[in-house]
Amino acid sequence: MTNNRKLNVTGGWNFRELGGYTTVDGHSVKWHKLLRTDGLARLTPDDQQLLTDYGVVADVDFRSNDEKKLAPDKVPAGVTYHFLPVFPAGDETDASATQEELEARFNGDDQAGYRHMLDVYQKMVTLPTAQEAYHNFFGTLLSNETADQSVLFHCTAGKDRTGMGAFLALSALNVDPQIIHQDYLLTNPNVMPLVDRQSDKAREEGHSEAFVTNIRALSTVNPDYLAAATKVINTQYGGTQDYLHDVLGLSHSDLTTLKRLYLD
């Protein structure tokens, strides 16, 4: 699963290819067409060149206006920037929250971070801003008609808003649900060194174990988080295919086009 999926980007830790994943009917996702990443603010000139050489033509940014201002993307040459904020104000996922904000909310109850993330995932499915962002994301995917040209999509950490984008895109392509699930969880090995450092630092600064547990819940992915979103999709919208059609506005013809563009 993980073989040569991770891009050798020094200014990021969660840059991954979605090529090679198999569909339920025996096709596979083309390489050099779909990339999921964390933020592009730390890209080096070499990283930017790598992405240009890789064939990236579109940069879809799911972050909020505040996050964008705080850490603007270093958009590689020849790449069109698409700003599609999932949340109306601020970063609901807390990937960019200040230490003070986190302390106030997460020092006591060690389940607060976990519960917060379940709520975030439900919002990514139900909020009008999220639905509009993912609708427009598919518009970008549908216009990427040239072979070996990639749409790159990201948020701050490349795990939640980006994870939902990957879930929706791969579901639209009919990728095996178990594979989609495994791809979602691939974030954890990529971010764990960073999360462990954060945890050690929090302990050194005298934070409670509840705080450390919550920070880890906010900084990683969990099968329960994605399950919270899919439960809403299944119970309120009739399932993923109905959600793609009725909520995100993808026609039968759009889905056929997506499969032609992104599948071997």
Image (cartoon, rainbow, N blue to C red):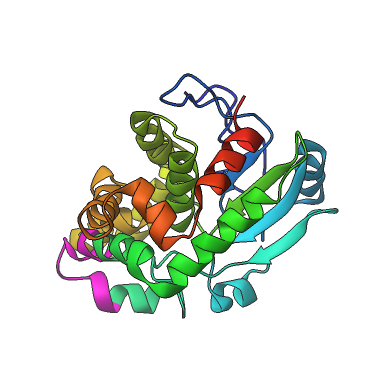
Position of 227 compared to 152: left or right? left
| Above or below for 251 versus 72 | above
Residue 111 belongs to magenta span: yes
Location of residue 116 in the rendering, given as x and y in whole percent from the top left corner = 25, 66
Residue 212 position in % (x across, y down) = 27, 58
Outermost residue toward the top in this view? 26
Q: Assess whether residue 110 is covered by the magenta stretch.
A: yes
Q: Specify the quadrant that holds the C terminus.
A: top right
As displayed, is residue 92 above or below residue 42?
A: below
Image-quadrant location for residue 228: bottom left
Q: Is residue 74 visible?
A: no
Decide if residue 155 is in sight here: yes
Q: Main secondary structure of the magenta part?
A: helix
Q: In the depicted view, which residue is nearer to us: 201 or 178?
A: 178
Point 37% across, 55% down: residue: 243
- Is residue 205 left or right of 10 when viewed as pictured? left
Q: Position of residue 29 (x, y in %)?
A: 57, 29
Relative to 171, is 75 on the left or the right?
right
Is residue 93 positioned above or below 56 on the image?
A: below
**In this picture, which residue range is highlighted in magenta?**
104-116
In the figure, residue 117 lies in which quadrant? bottom left
Above or below, comparing residue 76 to residue 63 in the picture: above
Q: How many marks?
A: 0
**Residue sitting at x 60%, y 24%:** 4
Residue 131 coordinates in the image, percent (x, y): 44, 66
**Nearer to me, 48 or 52:** 52
Q: Nearer the viewer, residue 187 or 261?
A: 261
